[in-house]
Image (spheres, rainbow, N blue to C red):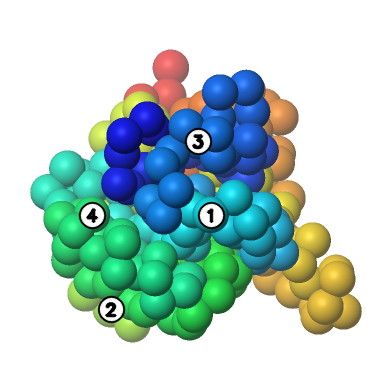
């Protein structure tokens, strides 16, 4: 980070972000004063606020900027960025944001807002993957042609972006991780922590978390998150493409 105007950090979680910032020879020591740290890991909003406050006391800026879009859209510079931070942080980060984002949402003047928006997205994404996996495995149990099921559902009201995007992995029997099961173990776990603190019930996302946990416990934690369908198949004796 020495000599950089902008550091963009895209890691798995808050703990890794904190190490990058405040660990040995961390960004908080090496980044020049008045430069900006763009934090794009998905994390609890309270942690984002704490990290921002810690960094800002050293004379550097912190932009809370979780991302959505996956590796393909990242490579094309077409991410959706959900950002919040001070006007100074936005001004400093603008060249990087313009290069990376197809859609930039400016969601507030303090860290934590971007993180909170991302957690709402992750609640829906995790639930939709679990629901899509359940539906596809159930269709197989009914003896349906699951390729035809995919064709019908993607043209019907039951479709979701996650169904359309993830279920081809099931159809191809290809669980090379585009986004791993463990990501949703983490993110749906954060949602449970946030909800418990807020005394807010989230039973649907809690059920989805249990399916991701079960899939991880069965040894598929680092496989593609569509592996939840494989877990349903193992539990119910259903055969899916690629099964030995």
Quick check: 191 above or below 229?
Answer: below
Identity of the residue furthest to the left in this view:
76
Q: Name the residue carrying label 3.
A: 27
Secondary structure under the numbered disc 2 in the rendered image? loop
Secondary structure under the numbered disc 4 in the rendered image? helix
Residue 49 visible within the image: yes
Instruction: Name the N-terminal-most of marks 2 and 1.
Output: 1
How many angstroms separate mark 3 from mark 2 (CA)? 49 Å
Q: Which of the two marks, 2 or 1, is nearer to us in this view?
A: 1
How many angstroms separate mark 2 from mark 1 (CA)? 53 Å
Q: Name the residue carrying label 4.
A: 96
Instruction: Name the N-terminal-most of marks 3 and 1.
Output: 3
Secondary structure under the numbered disc 1 in the rendered image? loop
Q: Which of the two marks, 3 or 2, is nearer to us in this view?
A: 3
Q: Residues within 10 Å of mark 2 (few under 14, many from 20)?
A: few
Instruction: Name the N-terminal-most of marks 1 and 4.
Output: 1
Residue 178, x across and y down, in percent: 35, 37
Secondary structure under the numbered disc 3 in the rendered image? helix
Q: Name the residue carrying label 1.
A: 59
Instruction: Name the N-terminal-most of marks 3 and 2.
Output: 3
Q: Which of the two marks, 3 or 1, is nearer to us in this view?
A: 1
How many angstroms separate mark 1 from mark 4 (CA)? 20 Å
Q: Are marks 4 and 3 in contact (CB under 8 Å)?
A: no
Locate the C terminus and report the quarter of the image it occupies.
top left
In this picture, residue 242 sits left or right of residue 187 = left
Q: Which mark is residue 156?
A: 2
Q: Which mark is residue 234?
A: none
Instruction: Name the N-terminal-most of marks 4 and 3.
Output: 3
How many angstroms separate mark 4 from mark 2 (CA)? 39 Å
Q: Which of the two marks, 1 or 4, is nearer to us in this view?
A: 1
Most foreground residue, 78 or 166: 78
């Amino acid at each position: 980070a020495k000599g950089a105007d902008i550091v963009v950090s895209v890691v798995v979680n808050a703990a890794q972000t904190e190490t990058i910032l405040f660990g040995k020879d961390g960004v908080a020591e090496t980044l020049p004063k008045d430069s900006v740290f763009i934090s794009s890991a998905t994390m609890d909003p309270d942690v984002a606020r704490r990290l921002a406050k810690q960094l800002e006391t050293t004379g550097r800026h912190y932009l809370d900027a979780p991302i959505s879009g996956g590796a393909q859209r990242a490579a094309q510079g077409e991410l959706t960025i959900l950002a919040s931070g001070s006007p100074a942080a936005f001004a400093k980060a603008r060249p990087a944001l313009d290069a990376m984002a197809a859609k930039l949402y400016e969601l507030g003047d303090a860290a934590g807002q971007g993180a909170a928006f991302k957690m709402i997205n992750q609640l829906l994404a995790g639930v939709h993957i679990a629901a899509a996996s359940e539906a596809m495995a159930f269709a197989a149990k009914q003896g349906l042609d699951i390729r035809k099921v995919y064709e019908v559902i993607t043209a019907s009201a039951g479709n979701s972006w996650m169904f359309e995007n993830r279920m081809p992995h099931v159809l191809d029997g290809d669980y090379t991780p585009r986004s791993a099961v463990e990501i949703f173990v983490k993110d749906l776990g954060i949602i449970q922590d946030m909800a418990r603190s807020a005394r807010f019930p989230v039973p649907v996302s809690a059920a989805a978390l249990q399916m991701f946990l079960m899939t991880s416990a069965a040894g598929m934690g680092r496989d593609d998150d569509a592996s939840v369908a494989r877990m349903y198949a193992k539990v119910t004796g259903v055969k899916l493409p690629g099964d030995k």
